[in-house]
Structures are given as structure tokens and as C-alpha cells.
Amino acid sequence: MNGMDSTTEKKVITQAEVTAIVYAAITKEVDEEITDKNKKDNLIDDLGADSLGLSEIIMQVEDDLGINITDDEGLELTTPQKAAVFAKKALKDGRSEKYTCH
């Protein structure tokens, strides 16, 4: 069991809050604030993350949002924007233990 029973309600968070959580995890790792100007930048080529940094970002997003990101899914998260879109979809699809997003 994951510690939560079926009667436990998930907290509803906004799409903007999901984006902020994802961008904060990325900012912490690449030491550059994610904004509209760089949200489409490649995490490795443009923002300087390495493979360990990408793993740290994924683990942080998983912890913060209560979702599991498979290795294959992680490979697709190449930009901050793609990571945020993925996280929002995961919450909408009910993949989080903590949150839902509408």
C-alpha cells in the first residue's frame, strides 16, 4: 500500500502551480530561472544540465508532485515546457498520489 486509502482526497492545484513546481526543480539544477524566454530551451544543450542533473530534476518533480516518471518518459522531457506539459497531463490523468489538476 502507498499509505493513502481510496477515501483520501487529492489537493487540486492549478496548471500555473504545476508549471511553477516543475520550473523550480529545473531552476535549482541549472541555476538559471526558467521564464517565457527560455522555456523552450534544451535542458542539456542550452541550459547546461548533464545526465545527473536531468535525473535530479526528474526525481524532484516526482517527489514534489507525487508522480512516477518512467525512463522512457524522462527521455522526452527535453525542455522546461515539455516537462511542465507532461506533469500537467500526468496530474489530469490521475497519476499523482497527492494532486489533481484541471
Image (cartoon, rainbow, N blue to C red):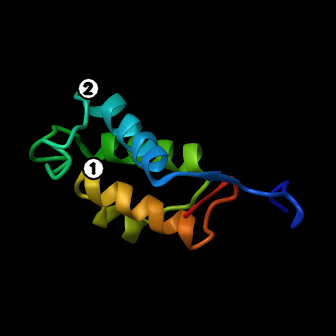
Which residue is at 13% across, 41% downward?
A: 37
Dot 1 falls on a residue whose secondary structure is: helix
- Rate crowding at label 1 as few (under 14), some (14 to 19) or many (20 or more) other CA atoms within 10 Å: many
Residue 67 in the figure: left or right of residue 58: right
Nearest the viewer among 59 and 65 is 65
Residue 47 lies, with reference to residue 81, above or below; the image says above
The quadrant holding residue 28 is: top left
The quadrant holding residue 95 is: bottom right
Q: Amino acid at mark 1?
A: Pro
- Circle 2 is placed at which residue position? 31
Q: Amino acid at mark 2?
A: Asp
Sequence order check: which comes first, mark 2 or mark 1? 2
Q: Residue 50: where, in percent of width, then height? A: 23, 42
Which residue is at 35% across, 41% downward?
A: 23
Residue 53 lies, with reference to residue 31, above or below; the image says below
Residue 7 in the figure: left or right of residue 49: right
Residue 85 lies, with reference to residue 98, above or below; the image says below
Q: Residue 25: where, in percent of width, then height? A: 40, 37
Q: Which mark is residue 91?
A: none
- Circle 1 is placed at which residue position? 80
Which residue is at 49% across, 42% downward?
A: 60
